[in-house]
Amino acid sequence: MHRIDQPIIAFRRSDAAAGESAPAGDDNPLGKRIPSRPEGELESVTEKVRYWTQEGPQTVYLVVSFMAVSGTVGGERVTIERPIEFFLPTGQHSESYQWISATMRSLSLAARGGYAARALRDLRKVTWDRGPVRSGTSDYGKPLYHPSEVAAIAFALQNILQRRGFLDPDGHPRPLRDLAAYHDKARNTRPADVPILDSPQSGPMGSSLCPQCDGHLEIIDGCPTCRDCGYSKC
């Protein structure tokens, strides 16, 4: 049984008011409410996420969908890209499937309400009684540990939004002007050439794979090391 010491999602407009809502009198696209998922296609990112619990390695596939949202701020028309849907594809059979799927639905509601960043920061604080969960590495290549499986999933989703250019390294939305400039640049650039802000460098061509997580091994201080899970041959 999971123990949740912090609420997963608090559906309050006051969440959006804490820095993520629209200023009074403006139609800010960052906090604009989207009643439901629009019809048709949405741009999406699918990511395979692997983390380690006391029961061993766990793998899930997560999908985040984005859409362009327009508004008016200070009399100026602004368009940005926002995440509006978090999704867990079916067919991933594990005891965690139900709660991860439910969390994705809650996050989708939060995203369409304009406070996805706040919801993800709250999820990073969720704890459980099964010990820490290892997922990702620090800037120095050290493994990162999270207080629960929920927190590890939230960390992975934050990374997706950071690479997409929506969140800064602290998990807050980037300034509105930066988001608008990024959207305009992406719209006028061929998809294959669209830069991703804060995108981590990929492993070198021809590098061998990590035997622990199938990530790329990089030479760090003369030793083949995996940045994904912290494995080292030395």
Image (spheres, rainbow, N blue to C red):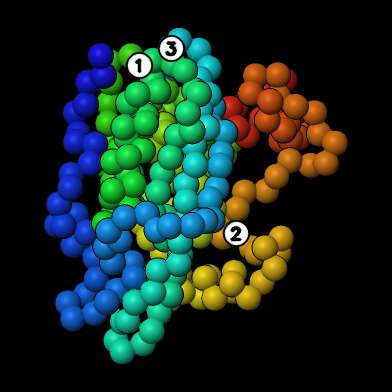
| Local secondary structure at mark 3 | loop
Q: Position of residue 48 (x, y in %)?
A: 57, 33
Look at label 1 and name its amino acid: Gly
Which residue in the protein does label 2 denote?
Answer: 196
Vertical comparison of 10 with 51: above or below:
below
Tell me if 157 is positioned left or right of 195 in this view.
Answer: left
The one nearer the camera, 141 or 40, is 40
CB within 8 Å, label 3 to label 1:
yes
Q: CA distance from mark 3 to mark 2?
A: 34 Å
Q: Position of residue 64 (x, y in %)?
A: 47, 47
Q: Position of residue 190 (x, y in %)?
A: 70, 68
- 3 or 2: mark nearer the eye: 2
Look at label 2 and name its amino acid: Ile
Q: CA distance from mark 3 to mark 1?
A: 7 Å
Vertical comparison of 100 with 169: above or below:
above
Q: Is residue 89 visible?
A: yes
Residue with the most extreme top position? 55
Name which residue lies at 39% across and 74% down.
Answer: 70
Q: Residues within 10 Å of mark 2 (few under 14, many from 20)?
A: some
Tell me if 143 is positioned left or right of 213 in this view.
Answer: left
Split into 4 quadrants, where in the image is the N terminus?
top left
| Local secondary structure at mark 1 | loop
Look at label 3 and name its amino acid: Gln
Q: Position of residue 10 (x, y in %)?
A: 18, 44
| Image mark for residue 54 | 3
Sequence-wise, the earlier of marks 3 and 1 is 3
Q: CA distance from mark 1 to mark 2?
A: 34 Å
| Image mark for residue 131 | 1
| Image mark for residue 65 | none
